[in-house]
Image (tube, rainbow, N blue to C red):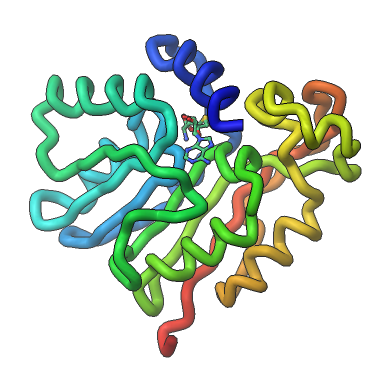
Amino acid sequence: MINAIQTRYGDLAESSCCLSCGSAASLCEPLPGQVCVDLGCGRGTDVLRLAEKVGPTGHAYGVDLTEAMLDKARKTARKLGVTNATFFRNDLEALALPDASTDWVTSNCVLNHVADKGRVWREIARILKPGGRFVVSDIYAVEPISPGDRADPEAIAECWAGAVTRDEYLAHVRDAGLRDVEITDESAPYGKGRATVASFTVTGHRSCCT
Ligand SMILES: C[S@@+](CC[C@H](N)C(=O)[O-])C[C@H]1O[C@@H](n2cnc3c(N)ncnc32)[C@H](O)[C@@H]1O
């Protein structure tokens, strides 16, 4: 699976095609001094915008599996003189970030790729500070993906075969203990690969008291 992701996204690192399925990061409202994390940051555009919002006393982290994406993001940060953004390679199922370290988690069109979605949502809950917020855009499958397609790494890397249904998606978010889970934006169904999917943006927060 990891190889299929790295091959597909390695090839796209220097392209300018849109890889997003919503506008999650633009809905984040971090304050100066806060910490933001973008899961599956790709070429790093959202991380650099968040770094600007949190200013020199804050920090924005971009996490991705694909080195070519991270290289591109680091080059752009250097070119723009951004010093409060860090990009590192990490699988989202085991984030190398401390517990309760993050004010905002965002992600755009990434979690559909990940095999163990429950684990990623538990990682999001773990790294958020009490009261910390998440804004995630992603795709869901209108009908369950067939077992054959679910086992096809290339189809998963193409952003459709790893998608779960809307109900299953939201159950993972809630099971992780995240609160006030809301869908702020949702597309009409559309065809992708051999599936019908839809895009949505999900928001919520970690309880302020845990
Ligand atoms: C569709 S692109 C989205 C990139 C970026 N969020 C954007 O909106 O432009 C998906 C990204 O997720 C990364 N990715 C996929 N699976 C991942 C995983 N398990 N852990 C970390 N990154 C992953 C890919 O390398 C790729 O850069």
In what quadrant of the picture does the C terminus appear?
Answer: bottom left
Image quarter of residue 199: top right
Q: Looking at this view, is 135 or 159 the one in front?
A: 159
**Residue 86: percent from the left, percent from the top?**
22, 41
**Residue 91: percent from the left, percent from the top?**
46, 44
Image quarter of residue 67: top left
Numbered disc total: 0
In what quadrant of the picture does the N terminus appear?
Answer: top right
- Residue at 31 percent across and 54 percent down: it is 36
- Residue at 60 percent across and 34 percent down: it is 21
In this image, 76 relative to 149: left or right?
A: left
Instruction: Name above or below for residue 1 compared with residue 84.
Output: above
Q: Looking at this view, is 180 or 192 the one in front?
A: 192
**Residue 158: percent from the left, percent from the top?**
67, 24
- Residue at 43 percent across and 12 percent down: it is 16
In this image, 103 relative to 184: left or right?
A: left
Instruction: Name above or below for residue 34 compared with residue 77.
Output: below
- Residue at 88 percent across and 38 percent down: it is 147
In this image, 201 relative to 50: left or right?
A: right
**Residue 163: percent from the left, percent from the top?**
74, 41
In this image, 184 relative to 208: left or right?
A: right
> Residue lying farthest bottom?
209
